[in-house]
Image (cartoon, helix red, strand yellow):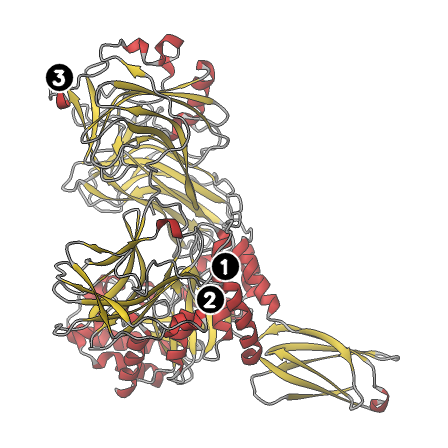
Amino acid sequence: MRRLFASCFRGPVSKRHIQPDSKRSEVTMASQGTVNTNIIHNHDFSGGLHSWHPNCCDGYVASGESGYLGGVTPNSGGGYAVISNRTECWQGLEQDISRKVSPSLTYTVSAIVRVLGALQGPATVQATLKLEYLNAAPNYISVGRTLATKERWENLEGKFSLESMPNRVVFYLEGPSPGVDLLIDSVTITCSSVKECKEANTRCLTDGDQNIIQNSNFDDGLNNWSGRGCKILRHDSMGDGKVLPLNGKFFASATERTQSWNGIQQEITGRVQRKLAYEVTATVRIFGGTVTSTDVRATLWVQTQNQREQYIGIANSQATDKDWVQLQGKFLLNSVVSKVVIYLEGPPAGTDILLNSLVVKHAAKVPPSLPPVIDNVAFGVNIVENSNLNNALNGWSALGPCTLSIGTGSPHLLPPMARDSLGPHEPLSGRYILVTNRTQTWMGPSQTITDKLKLYVTYQVSAWVRVGRGTSGPQNVNVALGVDGQWVNGGQAEVGDDRWHELGGSFRIEKQPSKVLVYIQGPSSGVDLMVAGLQIFPVDRQARFKHLKRQTDKVRKRDVVLKFSGPNACNLLGTFVKVRQTQNSFPIGSCVMRTNIDNEDFVDFFVKNFNWAVFGNELKWPWIEPQQGNFNYKDADELLDFCKKNSIEVRGHCIFWEVEYTIQSWVRALIKNDLMTAIQNRLTGLLTKYKGKFRHYDVNNEMLHGSFYQDRLGKDIRANMFKTASQLDPSATLFVNDYHIEDGCDTRSSPEKYIEHILDLQEQGGPVGGIGLQGHIDSPVGTIVCSALDMLGILGLPIWFTELDLSSVNECVRADDLEVMLREAFAHPGVEGIMLWGFWELFMSRNNAHLVDAEGSINEAGKRYLALKQEWLTHTHGHIDNQGQFGFRGFQGSYTVEVVTLSKKFSQTFVVDKGDSPLVVSINL
């Protein structure tokens, strides 16, 4: 979500009028003798908008040559910037000043501004700093503000100082209401000390001793640089002077490129250490060719000591031929390496890659997140005004030119998922909002809820929805939130018949918004929409946890009786007994990749805290057979050996993947008969080689979201894949595997559709043996997850969370989300295993989802996981009773019992397995 500029300011606003004919020296810092230290590039727009960027709006420079806007002449110089087509208050003009500022110095800002447009009275213009950090939310600092008018230029003044250096610092001007043009004559940012500022700028531009890249700004020609399959050149300008360096005097181009991987490179062998995280910042753009915008990627090529080659993606960014952009990312080397090269690649052949500077340095430690302060939350209280329509349509408005009216006959009961969260609740009114005359899918009832939301609180969404008769097919209905213009999914339902359907979902907002609008949308134009009893309420997770702990005790524990015998059994009354559980047998595993097991710190955490594994890529078809007939089983073999050595069970992910973009090009190019042959060869080769070694297989991944094989080979191919896999390895449990089953936010993969899909495979003879829920979920609500598990449980198949990850910049919020999912899964009788989709930073598919940072520090999410692991171990003690027994209720898994008598200390191990009746364990002393 984009942080929005607040339209109402608190506190006094300095106002200084500047006469139209004022001289430049009267409104800049020139009189203070520091004009030469201005860190703003192209400060008076004499170079057009070079180095400046309009932020989601339009911009140009008005001059005597091009014509002044509305008769407004510049305050000084020959032109001024005009920022127009602004639809939000925060939209304005920005410049990246990251390499021109330094911590602990004070900078003075002076900008000459004006406004133009349909406004009454003055408008506030603000200077703002945006501070960006890796793996953290950006911070915004107000530098200064002024009241600007149409009649005259005003001076905006302010100061700022940075306590520490963020990854990126952006200065920008913002503030007037949408539709009002912002005019900027000049901008000056100066140091309080000319000498200190020059020294700081020199440090910023050369990066000191921290940057491991040599000749990073090309001041020493092209020394230390080379072309990767292409030619490189150094420039001080290109394109008849239109392309200039953003910083320094020079930039380099990778030219005469004939492949997308061609680019500019530098070998950094010996300058990077394994198990240290490095952050990379490159300033890039493109030139020539047939594209004006394309991806540019920073990649690391690594050769290990055993000659294994690795390609590590570091960062990518959309680069254009108009402006320089920054490309940022991080990397870590797990292995001992013999050679390391960093290079830029990506654009199509014929397009030059331009590089102004490259910085690679040891990544700064990100400080731990603080728990968000959340006060006075009214859990379970609906924040939607007039939800029951007791006061006509008060509080509601139509989004778009549709018509709202009130109907009667909707359900009086709360939808089941809301009922599970709220408990006993007064009946709904039976009234609903009828939306007619809809000419766009987004039209429907809406309500502003900005002031009713609290940051970092998880909200559950619930409603009854229905569509009018005469529709051509099922309709998607969505509760959406417009958060400062950004769409947030509050839940979806597919509605296809003449009845009311439950819609459930959830959301959370983690940045202060200016405006939040909730609205119900989705059906095709012309289709009437009915909405009843919309509920949006904060979820009491702690109350849910209490219920889950009781449920866990029923589902995951068993009564155990230790029955003691021996020569002196009659004398054992009152003897002290201590029972400790050494391992819970419930499967909890993680994704692991071949490179990870070269990192001793990763291995230590993994083998101590997980008992199952799944390979991230190494079993997938494109990895094993990237070109037809060219096989690579080595990585999977080494991972299997590692798991066997550490007594870790393994899931096989995945034999096939139904989504087209994941399939290697040679497979996509095959005609029907050849494709059938390739599929059979894949099945035979993989399952024969690894027969009995993988406990599970995900046979054809994400069949609810893709149809590559089915489209080409017919519906039967899916069931045939299961049949053939079962014949080749009867010991493996064969799973379906898909995403968004459990969160209510995707109508393609609702629990009902998943059940239908599984039954269809089984009816065709496909031996589906397990249900995989990937679990890539945001702001989870326990009752929604549990509802999906309950529905899937009717099939009687084991349910596994196969790829669980939770993402939040704040690690405390991430920990809370993780706890929700782990507790829900562990407490549900249908769930038989949980796999995390990684836990180590930089080796996960989602950012801000890790439990351990790149260098091995356990964050709050990791600590929460370990605490739950400890909670799910049973430790108890007591005394032998008069029947020679000691009883307790404990989690399933491995135990040690110690008995201390007057003559000796005795210990024995035993296992508590799953069962409904008490387990009697004989202990012979």
Pointer 1: what residue? 816
Describe residue 600's horizontal placement relative to residue 669 as left or right. right
Residue at horizontal 50 percent and vertical 56 percent from the top: 851
Upstream in sequence: badge 3 or badge 2: 3
CA neighbours of label 2 inside 10 A, class few (<14), some (14 to 19), many (20+): many
Which is nearer the eye, 53 or 652?
Answer: 53
Residue 223, visible in the rendered structure: no
What amino acid is found at the position of numbered circle 2 in the picture? Answer: Met
Q: Is residue 796 above or below residue 172?
A: below
Q: CA distance from mark 3 to mark 2?
A: 63 Å
CA neighbours of label 3 inside 10 A, class few (<14), some (14 to 19), many (20+): few
Q: Is residue 538 above or below residue 204?
A: below
Which SS class for mark 3? loop
Pointer 3: what residue? 64
Residue 807, visible in the rendered structure: yes
Instruction: Provide residue 126's location: percent of width, then percent of height.
Output: 34, 29
Upstream in sequence: badge 1 or badge 2: 1
For this orientation, the residue located farthest to the front is 391
Residue 562 image-quadrant placement: bottom right
Residue 381 image-quadrant placement: bottom left
What amino acid is found at the position of numbered circle 3 in the picture? Answer: Gly
Instruction: Provide residue 416's location: percent of width, then percent of height.
Output: 38, 74
Upstream in sequence: badge 3 or badge 1: 3
What amino acid is found at the position of numbered circle 1 in the picture? Answer: Asp
Q: CA distance from mark 3 to mark 1?
A: 59 Å
Pointer 2: what residue? 821
Q: Are marks 1 and 2 in contact (CB under 8 Å)?
A: no
CA neighbours of label 1 inside 10 A, class few (<14), some (14 to 19), many (20+): some
Q: CA distance from mark 1 to mark 2?
A: 9 Å
Describe residue 890's horizontal placement relative to residue 132 as left or right. right
Which SS class for mark 1? helix
Q: Which mark is residue 606?
A: none
